[in-house]
Amino acid sequence: MTKEEILKKYFGYSDFREGQAELIESILGKRDTFGILPTSSGKSLCFQIPALMFEGITLVISPLISLMRDQVISLNDVGVHAAFLNSSLTQGQYYKALENMKRGQYKIVYVAPERLLTDSFLQAVQEVEISMVSVDEAHCISQWGQDFRPSYLKIIDFLDWLPKRPVVSAFTATATKTVRDDVVSLLRLSDPNIVITGFDRKNLSFSVSHVKDRYQFTVDYVKEHIEECGIIYCLTRKVVEEVTERLQREGISVTRYHAGLSDAERKKNQDEFIYEQKLVMVATNAFGMGIDKSNVRYVIHYNMPKNIESYYQEAGRAGRDGLPSECILLYGGQDVVTNQFFIDNQGPADEMDSSTLEEIKERERERLRKMTFYCFTNDCLREYILNYFGERAPGYCGNCSNCLTKFEDVDITDIARNLVGCVKSSHQRYGIVMIVDTVHGSSNAKIQRCRMDENPYYGTLKEVQIHRLRQIVNYLILKEYLILTNDEYPVLKLSEKSEGLLIQEDPIIMKVAKEREETKEKKEKK
Ligand code: ADP
Ligand code: ZN
């Protein structure tokens, strides 16, 4: 059978999507291949189809037990013999599966990276022909990726151990340049064919809102889109519960999903959403992996997620059918703190040592900062995201909240000087809240305890709204007039540019939103 026939026969599709044919051809030509494609672009087919065409077995290395299970079930459904080997199997089941593998019953075997170097597995693969090793979620091998798993490093030893080197293919949805280089060098891909398809999802519109009342915004939005399917992502289970309950009371067709629910309830709620008995899903980031619902018209992030990788992946669950869909991020300052808390309290993934864990946390903090900047930039949001993934993009997309906002230039030199002066005179010891409260002249307990009411800048910016002051501080950080440290309690520090600011003549101009143009489409709807 040709690859087109297999596509039709087993998967029921008539055409390949962008990148798929090229990746499959490359693998069939026995060349190491690295595919970088956005989420839900159809990466699985790129190794599944060659797996069916090769003589021997294909091993697929995957970090996610649930995803393995789903893929194996759907493969078996269409008549492809596949199995998975991971910690969810009992010992009996595990050995049974190995036996079957040795007897050549499977074309595709999913295996968790921790299993690769175990005696039983090594012994089993010796007795069969391994045509290909395919590494899914390949970014997990890099310390610079957002999901570093030390056990992925075992893949190289495993490949070295095999009597004959198979074709190696690797796939990921998120690869910045560093991660990409890591995948190639750490997996020792030999002269790999690297296929990158564009990350841009043109049918998605992006917006960031600094609304006062997120719930009000959300309920209004949902009511305006009452017949459409949408996902509302929240940072914690507690917020999921709260938002679900309130929406329910409004009579909205809503269900929920988070790791605190029983397996049975998660399954039930997920199905209700997929089969549209419920139109709105309120969930933590536990929801969405392996879910394939094409007509999600909007994804609202009720809270800011921890990094751009997660954001783009979650937001990207909107509009898989290619129709216009909205991705809305509601920013609140507390989200930064909550995310920081998660990072600080995160434990090691499998066999990670403590210094590695520290480094990882450091990078996570950096990623969180980049996420926060996304919420404060006045430049094109799509450009920001694409640049983050190392892709070039025009400065104007015409389909994001910044491109659709008219800005006016505001001279913030004087305010900036007061803020920087306050940081300096208090010896760079405090975070954003304290500095803002001080210049605004707030009189809370913390101000008094730290005697900031005696600071020379106390109350100098009384007439400027707190919200505006925060916005300006964030702008100053963005433009490196101030530095926010990466510590557990981030502190504002002076930068090289701050000293200049205190004496310079040139004004600092910030773009501030003036009015929002409605998108053409919305106007037409009305
Ligand atoms: P990824 O791993 O890139 O996130 P998947 O492999 O899970 O994406 O594929 C996403 C969805 O797209 C799946 O439902 C898959 O069946 C579907 N799909 C993949 N290739 C094609 C194709 N050529 N035509 C139509 N649908 C496809
Ligand atoms: Zn834009």
Image (cartoon, rainbow, N blue to C red):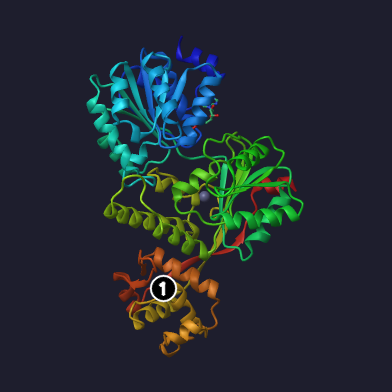
Task: Choose between 393 and 442: the one closer to the eye.
Answer: 442
Q: Position of residue 513 (x, y in %)?
A: 56, 63
- Residue 15 shows in the view: no
Query: What's the residue at 63%, 55% (across, down)?
Result: 241
Q: Is residue 114 above or below residue 519?
A: above
Task: Choose between 436 and 268: the one closer to the eye.
Answer: 268
Residue assigned mark 1: 431
Query: What's the residue at 54%, 72% (across, down)?
Result: 467
Q: Is residue 473 above or below residue 463?
A: above
Quarter location, residue 341: bottom left
Q: Residue furthest top?
A: 1
Q: Residue furthest right?
A: 251
Q: Is residue 413 above or below residue 382?
A: below
Task: Choose between 471 and 48: the one closer to the eye.
Answer: 48
Label 1: which secondary element:
loop
- Residue 245 shows in the view: yes
Task: Choose between 20 and 519: the one closer to the eye.
Answer: 20
Query: What's the residue at 42%, 71% (across, down)?
Result: 508
Quarter location, residue 36: top left
